[in-house]
Image (cartoon, helix red, strand yellow):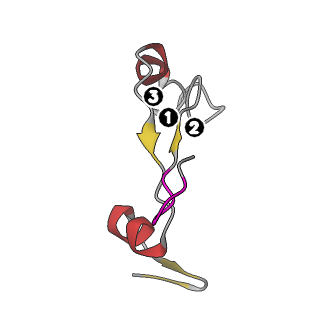
Amino acid sequence: MEFGDKVKAKSILAGGQSGDPSSPHFNDQIERYKNIDWKDVPFYYEDVVKRAKEKYVPGKRD
């Protein structure tokens, strides 16, 4: 975490984002972890929206 005019943060998972070995996200971060290649955390709403792959509204899909 970095505090200033805007908050900045970085993160990494030691393995992946899924516990399912058949998922493409089971070990998708191993190389990043090994190389200490941390990713930026989208902290502010506008940053989250820029990265969103899909927008979900309960009861319907865009």
Q: Earlier in the sequence, mark 2 or mark 3?
A: 2
Q: How many residues crowd mark 2 within 10 Å: few (<14), some (14–19), many (20+)?
A: some
Q: Amino acid at mark 1?
A: His
Residue visible at 48% across and 51% down in the picture: 41
Residue visible at 40% across and 16% down in the picture: 35
Q: What residue occupies the far left of the structure in this picture? A: 50
Q: Amino acid at mark 3?
A: Asp
Instruction: Tell me: residue 1, above or below residue 5.
Output: above
Q: Which residue is mark 1?
A: 25
Q: Residue 12, how many percent across, how many down?
A: 53, 33
Residue 17's disc is: 2
User: Is residue 60 rendered to the left or right of residue 51?
Assistant: right
Residue 28's disc is: 3
Q: Residue 59, how many percent across, how many down?
A: 59, 86
Helix, strand or loop at disc 1? loop
The magenta region covers 3-8
